[in-house]
Each structure stands twice: as structure tokens, then as C-alpha cells.
Amino acid sequence: MVTRREILILSLDERPHLPAGVLESQGWDLRMATNSVDAKAAIGKGNLHVGLVHCADFHESTLETIEDVILSRDTMEWVALVPAAGLQTPEAGRFVMENFHDFHTLPVDPMRLVVTLGHAYGKAALKSRLDSPNRNAGGHRMVGTSSSMQELYQNMCKMQGSDSPILITGESGTGKELVAQAIHSHSPRRQWPFVAVNCGALPTPLIQSELFGHEKGAFTGAFQRKIGRIEAAARGTVFLDEIGELPLELQVNLLRFLQEKTVERIGSNRVIPVDARVIAATNVDIEQAVKDGRFREDLYYRLNVLRLKMPPLRERERDIELLAHTCLKEFARKEKLAARGFSKRALRAMYSHPWPGNVRELINRVKRASVMCEGRLITAADLGLDNPDTAGRVLSLDSAREKAECEAIRASLQRTMNNVSEAARQLGVSRVTLYRLMNKFGISA
């Protein structure tokens, strides 16, 4: 008994002369489309693995339409059906080479076409099996199958139904805001606002107004009433990023909100009840900040009811390739780029790199490489990881940690214009510790 398989046939100009009887006798059910809308609708509805595109001409508008359909599902394989003289121009040849599993010249040789389609179907089925079903297990664009990410997903699920505050800790670039958004989007508050506030990016004089709002005339320049971010998050979630950067004098105001669930706008004595869940995040050692007197202990205990720790990318080795391919597919689909994968040397370089910037660094490197890449495979050089000191060599955890610490210290000193005290505060360490590390790595301010 012949196994039935569906094939989508897209022809924009004229109906191709296909051996329908032969194809159907070999187990193919033909589905025709004459425009991109019908083609994408068929792809969305059906269990399609293979598409056959009839390219009667290679006008730019036609190629753009075909490319739009092909990029709508990355697990499908496509075969081009082209006139014998159709591949003579460089543009046509490049288009077929970059977008199709194979091509078949007209007139049709029925049995050769059947073999070509069979190979394409097998490759598409293999891609579907390799496309991990729990790739987005964390929801909200979260990617990762490592044990540390599975533990994170489980803890997130436990916290989604609670109204208790959450404190998310972890290095910069690990995706703390993404986790907060995922928790909110799966919580009973998901139909109400998610309001994010970066406490480290707001000028100190404006933080109180931004968080709690102000009345008209409350101070010079207050020309109208302003609703604060916390009040704007009523019935939803307020995400306080870089909470460790919040000045001490404003921490007491936040503590009062957590205790009383009320806010007072600047210039007003009216107490406004606000029901908003608080999720805070920090990349500094918050316990050390409490010991150093930079963060109120009572506020710390109010925020640290539920705790999530984001694993750095260097501890998620099995996720590196998965993240890179996921990012590349997204960029290629949006920008219609030629790159479709990574060379073996590029993958080795990614596994050797300590990723001090974590997932954010990986996303930036892949995005830049996908634009600069000249072939189908991104190289280590495209990623900026072709340094012989790192490429092809597996770093020990200690070496990776030291490299990450050194780069973080250099970056912090550069941001603070070599202000050691400010750099120590940003890094969450004491000045003595920072001086010791600077001496260890040979860094001078």
C-alpha cells in the first residue's frame, strides 16, 4: 500500500504540465496555489513537508513572492520546476541555489521528478524530527533544553499563579526581563498591563515621579498630572529591573507600597490603592549590597519572597547551538538573508567562547554575522570568534570565569570613566575586592 503524502504546487503565471497521474500513483496528493495568499493558507492548514514551485520567469517581483512563501515555514523543502534556459542568468541561478533543495528542468521527466520529491520529503521529515518540541518550553520566546533551563521552567510554572513578589538574579544579558514577561503572560494577571522600569537608567531626581507619579504643579515643570509606572500597572505586573541601583532614599517609598499596596503621587496627600504584582531583578550581589548598607534589609526581605536565578550561558553549553540556530532562523526570515546555518568551525568557536555578555551577546553576534555572511554557512570570522587563542580550544570553567570577570571589570571601568568606587558599586563588590581583581588581571585605572 502506497503511503499518501501531500505536496503544494505553486505556479504564479501559468499552470505547469505535470504528470498528475504518475505523481498520484506514487502516493502524492496535489494541492494547487496560484498566489502567495493561497499558498501560505495551505501551508498553515496542512501537514505539508514538500513544495514544488513552477518558475516560468525570474522577474524580481515573482522571486520576492516565491521567497515570501518559502520562508513562511522553515521545515518544508522546496523543489524548483524551471525552463531549461531559465538558469542562465546569475540572479536566477543564485536564487535557486539559495532557496531550493533541488531543481528539475522542463519538460518533466516523471520518474526523475518522483525521485527528487522523495528525497526532499525525507529531508523535510528529518528536519521536523530534529526540531525539538520543547524548544520553547519556557514560553514567551524562551529557548533552552539544558537541565538548568528545565529547572527554571519548573520554578516559573510554580510561581505563575501566585501574587507574591519575585526576585530574579543573574548576570547581565541572561534574559531576566524575558522571564518576568513569561511569568506575567501565563499568570491570572495576563490581560492587564506589564510595565517595565529600569531603575538603573532613570536619573535619580526623576525616579520618584516615574514610579509614583505627580500632580500638576507639584514642582517646576510639572505642567500636568502624571500617572506613575506602579499605578499604570494596576491589576497587572510591574517589573523593576536593576533594583539594586535604586537610591536608598527611594527604597523606603517602594517598601511602603509593598507593605500597604498604596501609592501617593508627588504633590498630593491622597492615598491611592494599587493592586500590582512586583517582580524585581538585579545583576548585583544583593545580599552583599545589604551588608554594605547600599540596600535596605527590610526591602530585601519584602522582595525576596520567591527567588529565581538565571543561569549564565557558559553553564548552558547544550543550549548554545540551539539558541544560535533559533536566532538565525528568526533573522533570516525577517531580513530575507542568505545564511542558513553555521560551519563546524563556527560551532566549535561558539562552544569555546565564555560568553561574558550571555544570551544578549550571542544574539548580537549572530545578527551581525547573518548580515555580513557571504555564503550559506556563517563562519567563525563572521561571528568575530576567529581568534586563534579561543577558536578550536575548550576553555576550563575557571579560565572562562576569569575571562568573563576581566572583561566585565574593563567594561565597567570604561563606563564609569575609571571611577573605581562607582565601578565597584555597579559590579556588586567592595572597592577592596575590585582593586584585588584589577591587580590580578593587570588592569590599571
Image (spheres, rainbow, N blue to C red):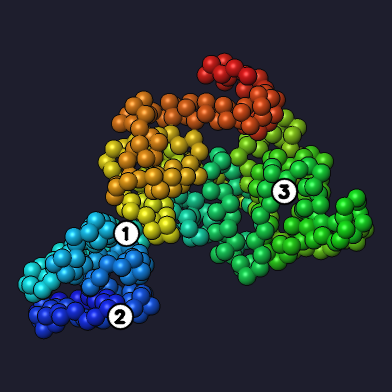
Disc 3 marks a residue whose amino acid type is Arg
* Left-right relation of 1 to 280: left
In which quadrant will I find the N terminus? bottom left
Tell me if residue 316 comes above or below residue 433 in the rendering: below
Q: CA distance from mark 2 to mark 3?
A: 61 Å
Confirm whether residue 186 shows in the render: yes
In which quadrant will I find the C terminus? top right
Give coordinates of residue 346: x percent, y percent: 32, 39
- Nearest to the observer: residue 275 or residue 52: 52
Q: Which mark is residue 302?
A: 3
Callout 1: SS? loop
Q: Are marks 1 and 2 in contact (CB under 8 Å)?
A: no
Mark 2 or mark 3: whose residue is earlier in sequence: 2
Mark 1 or mark 2: whose residue is earlier in sequence: 2
* Left-right relation of 235 to 160: right
Q: Which mark is residue 71?
A: none
Q: Which residue is mark 1?
A: 131
* Left-right relation of 102 to 402: left
Q: CA distance from mark 3 to mark 1?
A: 42 Å
- Nearest to the observer: residue 381 or residue 410: 381
Disc 2 marks a residue whose amino acid type is Thr
Q: Disc 1 or disc 2, which is closer to the eye?
A: 2
Callout 2: SS? loop
Q: Residues within 10 Å of mark 2 (few under 14, many from 20)?
A: some
Could you tell me which residue is drawn at 80 percent across and 47 percent down? Answer: 206
Q: Disc 2 or disc 3, which is closer to the eye?
A: 2
Confirm whether residue 135 shows in the render: no
Q: Which residue is mark 2?
A: 34
Considering every residue shown, the one lying at the far bottom of the view is: 21
Tell me if residue 392 comes above or below residue 185 in the rendering: above
Q: Disc 3 or disc 1, which is closer to the eye?
A: 1
Disc 1 marks a residue whose amino acid type is Asp
